[in-house]
Amino acid sequence: MHYYRYENAEVSCCFKYLMFSYNIIFWLAGAAFIAIGFWAWSEKGVLLDLTQVTRLHGFDPVWLVLAVGGVTFILGFAGCVGALRENICLLKFFSGVIGFIFFLELTAAVLAFVFQDPLREWINDFFLANVKAYREDIDLQNLIDSLQRLNHCCGAKDPNDWDLNMYFNCSQYNHSRERCGVPFSCCVSDPADTVVNTQCGYDIRALKGDWSNTIYTKGCIPALEEWLPRNIYIVAGVFIVISLLQMMGIFLARTLIGDIEKVKFSYY
């Protein structure tokens, strides 16, 4: 019996080490994200008392860091080891998961475009839920402060949304010094100031009249809606770059799988 053999059939070193180089970056980045996530939790004492994870009523940004780090680390590991060991199963796992993530991204983009009003309401409710939990987690607090400072906004729709927070509401039963105020990140900043005045928002909502000279009166949801059209090309560019990186990963993995299968077939 005669078998057909490919002449000089071998796995391309070019694609093999391109695949390895492509994934080692993501593998190391994933490990760094995981390390940062656990470091943040250790600083907050979560690792000593894991019940804090369930007690938090808002969004803990560390979860996002760990999730991104975990997925990136696993994919980077599968790509690196799959390329070096010429393991078809790991390479198929890598390309399959990347393809699935790409499909999810496209689906999310289409759904966000089609269902804009429900999405806007969901984002508004999500923001208000985290306004309530503002003082419960330092990372959440820093995230909201950064969002308000960068977008020159306050609250979800307006500064009065801070009435939902137990420390800032205007209720007569609230004895907090921050009563009827807003976080310092809502304050209109003076470029000449070298020290941040963390008490600038105290009692501001108890005052009648125009607040616009002291705090930002625009909500963060309207601010984000105005930001997106102004930066649509940047957003589109980021999406295209991410998509190209994903497609390049799939192309390298599938090409390497083809080479490995061709070499295996040549031995039969």
Image (cartoon, rainbow, N blue to C red):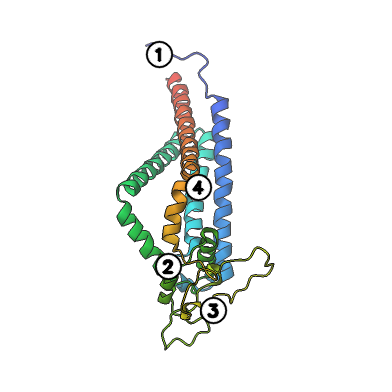
Residue 166: x and y in percent read 44, 79
Does residue 56 show up? Answer: no
Query: Of 66 and 59, which appears nearest the observer?
Result: 59
First of labels 2, 4 by sequence position: 4
Residue beneath label 3, please?
202
Asked if residue 72 is positioned above or below residue 211 in the image, the reply reads: above
Between the residue at mark 2 and the residue at mark 3, the CA separation in whole angstroms equals: 16 Å
Residue beneath label 2, please?
158
Between the residue at mark 2 and the residue at mark 4, the CA separation in whole angstroms equals: 37 Å
Residue 101: x and y in percent read 40, 44
Residue 237: x and y in percent read 49, 40
Residue at left offset 45%, top offset 67%:
155
Between the residue at mark 1 and the residue at mark 2, the CA separation in whole angstroms equals: 76 Å
Residue 3's label in the rendered image is: 1
- Please rate how many residues cluster around mark 4, counting C-alpha atoms within 10 Å: few if below 14, some from 14 to 19, many from 20: many
Asked if residue 72 is positioned above or below residue 168 in the image, the reply reads: above
Which structural element holds mark 3? loop
Residue beneath label 4, please?
72
Q: Are marks 1 and 2 in contact (CB under 8 Å)?
A: no
Circle 4 or circle 3, nearest the eye: 3
Between the residue at mark 1 and the residue at mark 3, the CA separation in whole angstroms equals: 84 Å
